[in-house]
Amino acid sequence: MPRLTHLAAAFVIAAAPALADDVTQFTLENGMDVVVIEDHRSPAVVHMVWYRVGAADELPGVSGIAHYLEHLMFKGTDDMAAGEFSDIVRANGGSDNAFTAWDYTGYFQRVSADLLPRMMELEADRMTGLVLTDEVALPERYVILEERSQRIDNDPGSLFREQMRAAQYLNHAYGRPIIGWRHEMETLSTQDALDFYAQYYAPNNAILIVAGDATPEEVRALAQEHYGPIPANPDLAARARPTEPPQTAARRMVYEDPRVAQPYVARSYLAPERNPGDQAQAAALTLLGDLLGDGPNSFLQQRLQFDTDTALFTGAWYGGLSLDATTFNLALVPAQGVSLRDAEDALDAALGAFMDTAIDTEKLARLKRQYAAQAIYDMDSVQGRARLYGAALTSGLTVEDVQAWPDLIQAVTEEDILAAARAILVPQTSVTGWLRAPAQATTPEVTQ
């Protein structure tokens, strides 16, 4: 694919003033969104390009193509040899990497501030000029298959969670793994990668985030120079995914694997995601997860480990940062001698008791203080802030939503949390799974 370098570059400012504190946002004429997070304490910058495409945007039959292409983006262009981009970053004392999720794919470099123009030049080059042949691409397919072997296939817990997610999402693509199903990964082709690249790797599907020692004016000029000439993809369609039908019956599964050393119970419930301008329930669910299962002072840990000696560990968490419907999750590792059936019954009893008991106001106040402190500590991580904004924006939120989140957490009441619990923790939207070793594996026969 030839690199386009001679088109007129221009931009329009979508929001010229800083939206809050040190965050500024504008949009190039070709549709590329730009966010600048100023932090001049160190002469370094984080340069990130996020694409609004992930595993949940893949067509049926090519699961894993988003992650496969992420690997292939390091294979070089007409102007850059394979691996040269990363070599340049490392030679200058920087670091770089990439990541794929269900809702986004991102690429980043952390370098000294004077290298920002070079990073933009190189990233713009591979946005349009990636060169792929079978000789380059097919060996990388073995790399991702080996990655799946190590991370998923050789870990019964990962296989169990993969199957639970597939049971939770019957129609939505969140039900397939980010890395892909092995039988489909084995057939991914160079053309599959090129088609995905041509469709989704375009400026009007991308967000540039620059955080650190740079000004909005500097970033605007550089973005105009390097990204502005790249034409938008006029055929880029809106993100339209199959919706999950209403779940009206609880689902159950048992996953057995002889490699399991510690059985446990897991459960997920369908839950609403954080939506732009409407994050109040998500804030309540976030605090619900903390109250139920965050650490030794949580409700489930106190009741099931310390009060009844039922569990060795309990956990609860909510994954609110998601473009579409997400999950609220629970886990319980039973104590020695406690069956999975008894552990699950104890978990249900504890959830019922939680919804019938007044929330500990001091625990809630302490959690809110921790969130307030964390919001301050987060200001120290330039890369963390850049990643927070990128994940939020590619999940459908706005800069204003990100900035409103800390205040929404503080505004949550005890009544909000109990209302969220009663709305979400209902059996008919749940998947409950048991992970255990087969009976014959736990009591092998003794032979003479």
Image (tube, grey):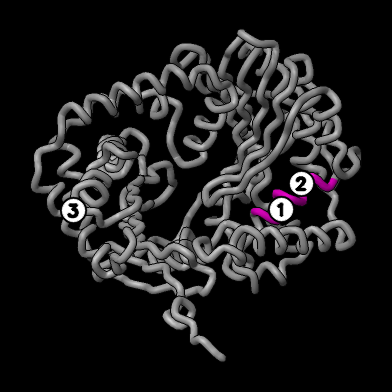
Q: Which residue shows up at 58% across the image and 14% down it?
A: 38
Is 68 within the magenta?
yes
Q: Nearer the viewer, mark 1 or mark 3?
A: 3
Residue 189, image quadrant: bottom right
Which x, y percent locates residue 115?
78, 19
**Residue type, numbered disc 1:** Leu
Q: Residues within 10 Å of mark 1 (few under 14, many from 20)?
A: many
Direction from residue 62 to residue 123 in the image, left or right:
right
**Residue type, numbered disc 3:** Ala
Q: Main secondary structure of the magenta part?
A: helix
Q: Which residue shows up at 41% across the image and 21% down it?
A: 375
Please state which of residues 228 and 352 is positioned toward the viewer in this rendering: 352
Instruction: Report the residue that reaches farthest toward the front.
Output: 448
Q: What range is drawn magenta here?
A: 67-75
Q: Alpha carbon of mark 3 to alpha carbon of mark 2: how far?
A: 48 Å
Which x, y percent locates residue 323?
44, 46
Is 66 within the magenta?
no
Residue 125 seen by the camera = yes
Q: Which residue shows up at 82% across the image and 37% down it?
A: 4
Residue 94, image quadrant: top right
Residue beneath disc 2: 73
